[in-house]
Amino acid sequence: MDENKQKCSRSSTYSPSRFSHVNNLDDGCLMHIFSFLSPIPDRYNTALVCHRWLFLACHPRLWLRVNRAVKDKSESGVFPSIEEAVSAARPGDTILIGAGGFHSASNIQIKKPLCLIGGGDLPDDTTLLCSRGSDSALEFLSTCKLANLTVKAELGCCLLHRSGRLIIEDCNLQCESNPLDYLSYAIITTAGDCGPPQLPLSAAKITGGDSVSVSQTRIMGGAKAVLTSGTLALQQVRVIYARTSMCFWFNVVHQL
């Protein structure tokens, strides 16, 4: 009899009803948890769970959004252009760029850690267009990440990397056809012009040293996929060839 009582008490101690369900948390606590998730795909997937999670996962506190059609600039966290969103963003913010049409992006300097993500299902759904005569669409002077975007440029480069760690995932970089397209590059990095890092390479990676990491990215047109300078060098290159483009994986890091 005593043994049965002990078994019953143990089973009641570990009963599922004694554990709190995640939905019992208040909105502020749940949103704080969501802030630690990777925007794509984890936070995106949480928005598919229910209406409450959709509201919290898309809350302006977690995302800044770019919507070319927006007219009411008083709406918190929504901007008509990428340049305005970058200017308003705080270090560590994620900017979700609306799908459909073309977003103007010419010589936009990014001097703080940000994540720019295309809002469509595919990179082709969200296009950043660099006007002719501009040096680049985006210029990076801090650690940043780009994902699910198409960037087009003519007589310039799509992405200009000055410093920090730049991560490019699942994007399309396209240099438009031009008789002078030998002057165009998908990526130009000048981060190595100041000489090698003072820290060892392993330590530089941990502290976010200068580097470029490209994965599952299609590159079309231009003279080269990437132009490096200084102590930066191309390493760990993998390429898949297709009829109209090549899909790249590579790293650009300081030489030992």
Image (cartoon, helix red, strand yellow):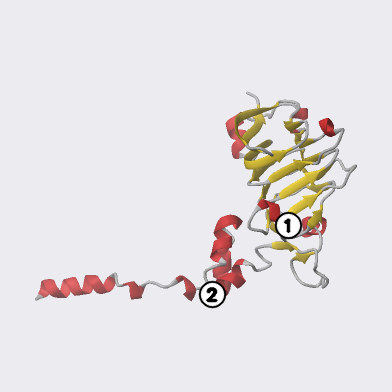
Whole-angstrom CA distance, mark 2 to mark 1, is: 25 Å
Q: Indicate left or right for 18 with 120 as reference.
A: left
Q: In the picture, residue 2 is in which quadrant?
A: bottom left
Q: Which residue is mark 1?
A: 90
Q: How many numbered discs? A: 2
Q: Which residue is mark 2?
A: 26
Q: Indicate left or right for 73 with 217 as reference.
A: right
Residue at image location 67% in from the left, 66% down from the top:
61
Label 2 crowding class (10 Å Cα cut-off): few <14, some 14-19, many 20+? few
SS under mark 1: loop
Specify the quadrant that holds the C terminus: top right
Residue at image location 67% in from the left, 59% down from the top:
119
How far from the left and from the top, in percent, is residue 66? Answer: 75, 61
How far from the left and from the top, in percent, is residue 31? Answer: 58, 67
Label 1 crowding class (10 Å Cα cut-off): few <14, some 14-19, many 20+? few
Residue 200 visible, this orientation: no
The three-letter code of the residue at mark 1 reads Arg
Specify the quadrant that holds the N terminus: bottom left
Q: In the picture, residue 29 is in which quadrant?
A: bottom right
How far from the left and from the top, in percent, is residue 82? Answer: 79, 56
Residue 211 visible, this orientation: yes
Q: In the picture, residue 125 is in which quadrant?
A: bottom right
The mark nearer the N terminus, 2 or 1, is: 2
Q: Nearer the viewer, residue 10 or 88?
A: 88
How far from the left and from the top, in percent, is residue 13? Answer: 28, 72
The three-letter code of the residue at mark 2 reads Asp
In the image, farthest residue toward the top:
256
In the image, farthest residue toward the front:
243
SS under mark 2: loop
